Image (cartoon, rainbow, N blue to C red):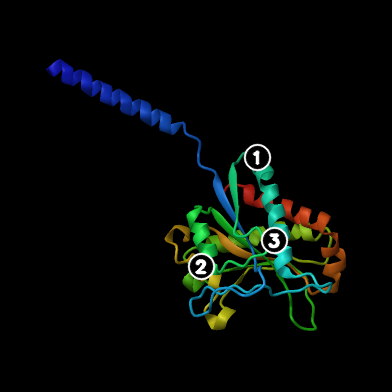
Amino acid sequence: MRDERRRRGWRHWLGAVLVCGWLGQLPAAPRVIVIDPGHGGTADSGSMAQRTLSASNNATSTGGLREKALTLELSKMIAEALPAAAARAGQEVKVVLTRTTDTNPDFAARARLCAEVGASCIVSIHFNATGGPKKALGSLAMISAESRNPNYAVDRQFARELTEACNAAVRRFLPESTARAPISDHHLHGGQGSNFFFQLARHPSLARVPKCFLEVEFIDHPQVQSAFLDRRPESFRAVAEAIAAFLAEPR
């Protein structure tokens, strides 16, 4: 009986060793990169009362191109470029878009998707506009304000480096464009901040995930229309590849 127990114990021990060795050889799960094409659809969705409101469109170019269409076009190009960029970096990634058609999921739905897929980083793609007679050029990113963001330092570095990568490609078509410093969302909605960041913060699993809005360029500048938007097969491809190369790097 004692010998049988000893043999059984050895079998259990050997089985545990083999299982642990097998598990140690399992490949790491691919990083999940979520790209959020800003806006979309034909109407606003959600509500400010629930902090879910997503506007269907904000900026429009001098040639009549709508931000919602541009964000979707560029986001799809980024998604297409990411697998090859990740392979070059020796990485494996999974890319998820929060929308793939002209729809406008509210921010609760977008945030829920980010949590469900286990996002490793989140980038919401947008285009800027000054909304006044004085026009501007430049790429910039927005992050959640420090007072309500436990990941502020990481988000700020992520946003700064992403902006620089994006703007390096933009400057090939708009040499006077600049990479602006990241801004926080403290100015939005009377100090309440971004509805998207609010909804993301409701998911504890996303607390330490790098995230930002990326405003690629000010599209109400006449020069942006002629030198950048009218050349989208070239310009958007360059920007998409630059963003993909940055996001593919492990972080």
Residue displayed at 47% across by 66% down: 201
Given this view, does label 3 or label 1 mark the residue nearer the observer? 3
The residue carrying pointer 1 sits among few (fewer than 14), some (14 to 19) or many (20 or more) residues within 10 Å by Cα, namely few
For label 2, the residue is 108
Q: Identify whether 138 is placed above or below 186.
A: above
The residue carrying pointer 2 sits among few (fewer than 14), some (14 to 19) or many (20 or more) residues within 10 Å by Cα, namely many
Residue 128 locus on image (x, y percent) = 72, 72
99 to the left or right of 17: right
Q: Identify whether 203 is placed above or below 117.
A: below
Kind of residue at badge 2: Ala
Q: Secondary structure at mark 1?
A: helix
Q: Earlier in the sequence, mark 2 or mark 1?
A: 1
- Give the numbered dot on residue 72: 3
Q: Earlier in the sequence, mark 2 or mark 3?
A: 3
234 to the left or right of 93: right
What separation in Å lies between label 3 and label 1 (alpha carbons)?
Answer: 24 Å
Q: Which residue is outermost to the top?
A: 3
- Give the numbered dot on residue 87: 1
What separation in Å lies between label 2 and label 1 (alpha carbons)?
Answer: 32 Å
Given this view, does label 2 or label 1 mark the residue nearer the observer? 2
Q: Residue 22 occupies which quadrant of the picture?
A: top left
